[in-house]
Amino acid sequence: MTKLWDKGIKLDETIEEYTVGIDYSLDNELLPYDVAGSIAHARMLAKIGVLTEKEYVKLEKELKSINTLHKKGKFKIFKIDEDVHTAIENHLVENLGDTGKKIHTARSRNDQVLVDMRLYMKDKLLEVMEASTTLAETLTSFANENKDVPIVGRTHTQKAMPSSVGLWAASFAESLLDDLKLLSCAFELVDQNPLGSGAAYGSEIPVDRELTAKLLGFSKVQNNVLYCANSRGKVEAAVLSACSQVMLDLSRIASDIIFWSIPETGYFTLPDELFSGSSLMPQKKNPCALELVRANTEIVAGYQNQVFGICAGLISGYNRDVQLTKEPLMRGLSVTKASVDVVNLTVKKLKVDKKKCLEGFTPEVFATDEALRLVAQGIPFRNAYKQVAKNIGKLKNEDPVKNIKGKKIAGATGNLGLARIKSELKKTLSFIKLEKK
């Protein structure tokens, strides 16, 4: 198998093994994107006269056949290939001769992998955004169904003030709205065409970067050819940062569900099919999936730090270090999407035991409300606070449902603002549908 950089000197096997690593394996997932980039590049080369129209047609046909073979499992990237770019070009040369040798004109593997990763990230980000939107919708519906179900709100894990199941669910729906904004910002960074930047310094051949941007569905060209190279890893870290925010929310949802579904609280119940068992204790129902969501939050944050650390301090231009940003980026996106799906499934099957929720209320939960009632009578808050504190034992239980319904300020238990959340989610879905066309 001919290396694209081969100059007649055989590379030491130890060096080859070390430098290739598992990159070839990861590239099997990138093959459709490399094919798309190659077709766009060939179309552009035909436009500027480097290829004849006949040569372009042959290249396009052969590249599409590679995609077909790949889908059937008949075109794979092996360690000897090094990467997807080499495997594809060698196939083109083998089948088309000199025409295949022209495909790399004014192009480097550097801008090839940039294009592949950008297209891959666009697709996977849309998947994460769509899944996160679905989860936010599920939480919003759950909030609406349980808006009048009171639950004890906690601070420092201790009983604090009256809350509601609706307030809890809506809080995470709104948090996911913020996460979706971060994912959208990451998508905007990704949505720039690096093709034509070459090895970070451009080319004398007048490549049409605007054309390839249009053909590949990028919103614009990434202008500075050196920044194209320097942005590798930077953009990936931004994507993983957005994913980390999603995972942060998922971990807290998971912890809340675990805590509120233990027998001692019993506010939530889940069907048996969402639990794993114990090899020793016959009675055990373990929330293993939710525990792994929490653990994977640290994993994704670690991927972000890994990418950031790899790129920090690199001198300008391409450095082989950035090859190692590929795996954490791909794994981070995959873990995030899977975790969102798990939490969405869990929330959809979550049942609320209203009786247990009501049983959790004791008189001291209403202490703050009592102090504020004294304030309404003209007593300074600090005096009211001390008066209630001295008489905690004399407080009486109240109607929690009436309490939560009576709090009408924006965003409180009696005014969750779910319509605004739904409106924002519709906008996000419209964006996703537009980009997926």
Image: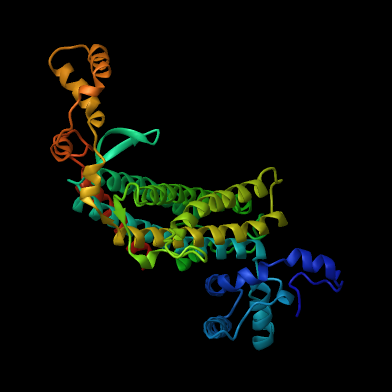
Q: Which residue is drawn at 35% across and 51% down?
A: 263
> Does residue 433 appear in the picture of this structure?
yes
Q: In this view, does 154 lie above or below 209?
A: above
Residue occupying the far bottom of the picture: 95
- Nearest to the observer: residue 268 or residue 236: 268
Does residue 384 lie above or below 18 as drawn? above
Residue 188 lies, with reference to residue 401, above or below; the image says below
Relative depth, front residue between 142 and 15: 142
Name the quadrant of the N terminus.
bottom right
Identify which residue is drawn at 39% across, 64% down.
274
Snapshot quadrant of residue 387: top left
Number of marks drawn: 0
Residue located at (21% from left, 11% from top): 380
The quarter in which the C terminus is drawn is bottom left
The picture places residue 207, in percent across and down from the top left corner, at 58, 64
Q: Could you say which quadrant of the image residue 115 lies in? A: bottom right
Looking at the image, can residue 218 be seen? no
**Quadrant of residue 52 within the rendered picture:** bottom right
Residue 295 horizontal/vertical position (percent):
52, 53
Q: Where residue 376 appears, x then y in whole percent?
A: 14, 18
